[in-house]
Image (cartoon, coloured by chain):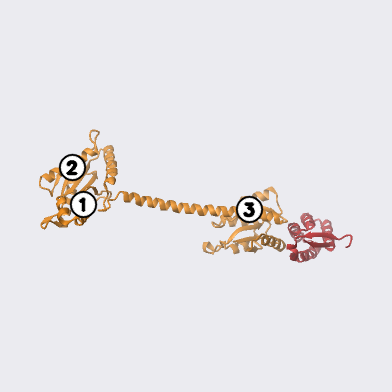
Chain colours: A red, B orange
Amino acid sequence: MAEDTIIITIDSELAELIPGYLANRRDDIRKMILAIDSGDFDTIRVIGHQLKGSGGGYGFDFITEVGMVIEKDAMEKNYEEIKRHITALSDYLDRLETVYE
Amino acid sequence: MSILIVEDSDDICLIMNRHLTKIGYKNILLAASAEEAFDIIGLDKGDSGINKDVELILMDIGLPGLDGIGACKKIKSNHWYNDVPIIMVTGDTSVISLENAFKAGAIDYITKPVKMIELRARVDSALKLKNEMDRRKAREIELEALTRQLKEANRILTNLSYIDGLTGVANRRYFDDYSEQEWKKAFRGHNFISVVLVDIDFFKQLNDTEGHLYGDDCLRRVAGALSDALRRPGDFIARYGGEEFVSVLPDTTLDGAALIGETMRTNVNSLNLCFAQSKTVTVSIGIAGMIPDKSRTLQWLISEADRALYTAKKSGKNQVKVF
């Protein structure tokens, strides 16, 4: 196991939902990168809002936290901060390993 | 029983659906917007199109288009859905947002991200409350129906208790209650009141020669003939006892009462009820009347009518005497 791996334990009842959920977050990252290039902060705000509302429900509290700040920074059109959050989310997904119990 | 989730995020819909299914709620309906929710519950389809299967709505506040608070308000304005609980599902737990949600008719809220333990507690509690309310309402409806039935039964019983079983006209009890009221009214209004007392002539002989069945039939038909003589609404004939009948006539002078008495007598004659081979059933009638004053009672007036009746009998029967 790599040293920087993030292990999250998830309720096995949710196992079949997790791959789809995480794949959607990759999509969110792509959409946010496109939106930030075109200055579409409203799309970023909506995605941030949805990340905030969904992450913790699946067991990914970090996704909720990062969604919260993305939503806030999108409202403030804080370009640099949003880019930083997107990178942090992408890094989190790369390092993430889920364990079911 | 269904639970409707109104939520624009597929991921949140999925997780809530999964949690609810795990808890044991099988029929979950999903709507991504307020408009979709209205369509599912048949809000714009009139009473016959309303989906009465939905027992709980979980509503996201931040919906695209009409938001959750507006949707909640509209749903609650529907008569049927006024009783269906709506729980808001929101990440925005600011006082103003929650206050608006409760004002719109929501009963509770769940914070996002949705955790199964919280969802379960809120949903179970809302449905328990709804079931209890439904049970009480059903009980209230049942009680209202029973009360109506009881009132109707009492009305029938009261009527029955005032009717003479043999002749179908009012009985002595009703006459006693009613005549006393009319006496008091006449006393207060200084109005004339008359009493007409009727007795079937030779009734004992009729029973002896023709038998009691014929006697009973005779009583019924005489009662009908006497009733026919009374034209005003509210006037009635009562069986006073045995073969005697009585009527109290408010606002009726002795002349008026005499006319009614005479009509009663001729009505009975017209029945042509025969007995003892050659005799026809007739009645004798005694009438008395007065403007009530403190020196007399209704019983006194009735006894006067009885004296007039006695005179009619002594004078050869089949006649009307007025005192």
Q: Are marks 2 and 1 on the same chain?
A: yes
Tell me the residue at 18%/56% (across/down): B211
Number of callouts in the render?
Answer: 3
Q: Residue B232 versus residue B209: which sits nearer the camera?
A: B209
The circle drawn on residue B306 is 2
What residue would you read off at disc 3?
Answer: B125
Instruction: Measure the alpha-carbon separation of dots 2 and 3.
Output: 76 Å
Location of the C terminus of chain B by quadrant is top left
To the question of a shared chain for discs 3 and 1, the answer is: yes
Which residue is label 1 attached to? B226
Identify the residue shown where x is 21% and y is 52%: B226
- Is mark 2 in CB contact (under 8 Å) with mark 1? no
Q: Which residue is drawn at 41% across and 51% down?
A: B150
- Give the image location of residue B176, x and y in percent: 27, 43
Q: Dot 2: few (<14), some (14–19), or many (≥20) neighbours within 10 Å?
A: many
Question: Badge 1: few (under 14), some or many (20 or more) residues near its Cα, within 10 Å?
Answer: many
Q: Distance between the residues labelled 3 and 1?
A: 70 Å
Cα separation, mark 2 vs mark 1, equals 17 Å
Name the image quarter holding residue B76. bottom right
